Image (tube, rainbow, N blue to C red):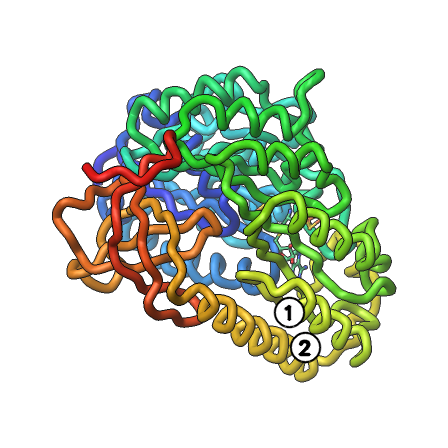
């Protein structure tokens, strides 16, 4: 064990992944070293998620493992970062005696100081939420690669009744447009090819006179070879201006993650989602008109309090109408402190499981049908490297975020854009063959 080695495990959403990079940046600047081997670390940090009970259970399990390690190595500092730190605060230290450090999402600047407190036998606690902290001036640590995440705003003001995020991440606040554009310039110079702008509700982005559409346009103009993605959009705030901005820039991906949660207006109201399903579907149709070939993905919750069979059918109907490319589907999980927690969790576990399975099965079938429709068409993909399963294949991604596998060819380098023909499909993956290199700038196929 070396005193300056830190090991970090990350759970939860992409914002947590981005925060881990931020924390790594902060710690490296203080002289810490990162390790991927927890056995040689002096400090073990878990960047945690509270979104559903299962997420927390998993992390408790992991804490149990480190408890054993700590028994043989009492100098080990174990810390909890992220949403669970914010939600449970001192409880984690008092109940789970192995935790020395509890640091919420807005207190990462203090981490080196709090680690020192823990090294000296104290408990390092930083759980204040901030109305202004955006870490705008800090540089996250990123290994070289193709894809980077950038948090452009923090927090959430929507207060959906089921959700802990407004409590764990605090109020909405945005980073400055200039610093985000500068960060993207550096990434482009380092050879990155894709940036995902992150926020719990990116459409609420606001930096003085600039809104999210302005930010997207400014990011897209940095480098035509750099793809821009973004997540998550809230249906309430997805503006026409944003749709036209996506349409107007070839390197802003034609892909929108737009959670609808439930197809029933009664449930949407109980969730405080602030839109009707009619409004949502109109928005989808408008986006399909403005942006040809636009793809959608979504989030769905099955078994929210008072959900009837009819409400559930309405959710399935939305899947049939929109035909998403993908969906993240969850069983409702009551979270203490939220408004829905006070509602009677009256849909039985058995019915939740059954409804969720029906949603998954239908979406699976739609994904397969949609992928089969792609057979014999041509797609432009960004090559990301070897496929996960075999070095005989390369994997790339379409603008619509679908993975395409093609046979390995040494002339095709990671980070290049190539035109492929699709030959075969499963519900999750497309399989194709190389046709030509593609210069996204000229929009013309060129042979290199
Ligand atoms: N800010 C994003 C995502 C938030 S969390 C948004 O508003 O869409 C990601 C997803 O987790 C949510 O969209 C929702 O579908 C799901 N989720 C959040 N809280 C949940 C809960 N208590 N039980 C089940 N699913 C939940
Ligand atoms: Fe949670 Fe709703 Fe905010 Fe998304 S918009 S983070 S679901 S409160
Ligand atoms: Fe989880 Fe927090 Fe993200 S609760 S989903 S890590 S914002």
Mark 2 crowd level (few <14, some 14–19, many ≥20, 10 Å Cα): some
**Which quadrant would residue 129 be assigned to in this image?**
top right
- Residue 123 visible, this orientation: no
Q: How many marks?
A: 2
Locate the N terminus by quadrant.
Answer: top left
Label 1 Cα neighbours within 10 Å, binned few <14 / some 14-19 / many ≥20:
some
Residue 305's place in the image compared with 232, above or below, is below
Residue at x 77% of width, y 44% of height: 236
117 sits to left or right of 160: left
The dot on residue 350 is none
Q: Which residue is mark 2?
A: 352
Q: Quadrant of residue 377?
A: bottom left
Taking the view exactly as shown, the residue that stands out farthest to the left is: 410
Q: Nearer the viewer, residue 408 or 107?
A: 408
Q: Which residue lies at the image location 59% right of the left edge and 50% below the top edge?
A: 257
> Assess mark 1: CB under 8 A from ligand 1?
yes
The quadrant of the image that shows the C terminus is top left
For marks 2 and 1, give the CA distance: 6 Å
Give how far across and how far down residue 315 sits, in percent.
73, 70
- The reply to whether residue 427 is visible in this rendering is yes
Displayed quadrant of residue 205: top right
Residue 29 x, y percent position in the rendering: 34, 21
The first of marks 2 and 1 along the sequence is 1
Give 101 or 188, whichever is nearer the viewer: 188
Q: Residue at x 33, y 32 (%)?
A: 192
| Residue visible at 46% across and 29% down in the picture | 111
User: Are the residues tagged 2 and 1 within 8 Å (C-beta)?
Assistant: yes
Residue behind mark 1? 331
Label 2: state its secondary structure: helix
In the image, residue 38 lies at what x, y percent? 28, 48
Q: Position of residue 39 (x, y in %)?
A: 24, 49
């Amino acid at each position: 064990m070396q005193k300056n080695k830190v090991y970090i495990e990350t759970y939860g959403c992409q914002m947590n992944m981005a925060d881990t990079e931020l924390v790594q940046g902060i710690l490296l600047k203080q002289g810490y070293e990162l390790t991927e081997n927890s056995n040689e670390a002096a400090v073990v940090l878990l960047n945690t998620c509270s979104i559903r009970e299962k997420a927390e259970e998993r992390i408790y399990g992991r804490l149990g493992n480190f408890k054993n390690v700590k028994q043989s190595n009492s100098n080990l500092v174990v810390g909890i970062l992220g949403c669970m730190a914010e939600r449970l605060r001192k409880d984690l230290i008092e109940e789970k005696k192995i935790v020395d450090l509890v640091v919420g999402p807005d207190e990462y600047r203090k981490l080196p100081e709090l680690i020192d407190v823990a090294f000296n036998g104290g408990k390092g606690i930083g759980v204040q939420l901030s109305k202004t902290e955006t870490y705008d001036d800090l540089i996250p640590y990123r290994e070289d690669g193709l894809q980077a995440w950038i948090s452009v705003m923090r927090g959430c003001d929507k207060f959906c009744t089921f959700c802990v995020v407004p409590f764990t991440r605090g109020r909405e606040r945005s980073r400055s447009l200039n610093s985000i554009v500068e960060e993207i310039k550096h990434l482009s110079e380092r050879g990155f090819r894709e940036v995902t702008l992150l926020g719990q509700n990116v459409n609420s982005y606001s930096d003085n006179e600039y809104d999210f559409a302005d930010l997207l346009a400014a990011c897209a103009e940095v480098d035509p070879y750099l793809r821009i993605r973004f997540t998550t959009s809230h249906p309430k705030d997805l503006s026409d201006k944003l749709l036209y901005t996506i349409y107007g820039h070839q390197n802003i991906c034609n892909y929108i993650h737009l959670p609808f949660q439930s197809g029933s207006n009664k449930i949407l109201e109980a969730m405080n989602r602030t839109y009707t399903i009619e409004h949502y579907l109109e928005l989808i149709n408008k986006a399909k008109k403005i942006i040809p070939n636009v793809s959608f993905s979504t989030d769905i919750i099955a078994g929210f309090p008072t959900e009837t069979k009819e409400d559930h059918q309405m959710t399935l109907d939305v899947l049939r109408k929109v035909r998403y490319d993908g969906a993240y589907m969850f069983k409702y999980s009551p979270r203490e402190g939220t408004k829905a927690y006070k509602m009677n969790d009256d849909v039985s576990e058995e019915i939740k499981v059954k409804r969720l399975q029906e949603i998954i099965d239908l979406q699976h079938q739609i994904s397969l049908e949609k992928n089969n429709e792609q057979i014999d068409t041509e797609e432009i993909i960004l090559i990301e490297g070897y496929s996960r399963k075999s070095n005989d294949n390369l994997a790339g991604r379409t603008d619509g975020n679908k993975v395409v596998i093609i046979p390995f060819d040494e002339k095709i380098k990671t980070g290049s854009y190539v035109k492929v023909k699709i030959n075969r499909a499963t519900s999750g993956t497309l399989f194709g063959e190389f046709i030509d290199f593609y210069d996204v700038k000229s929009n013309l196929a060129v042979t290199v």
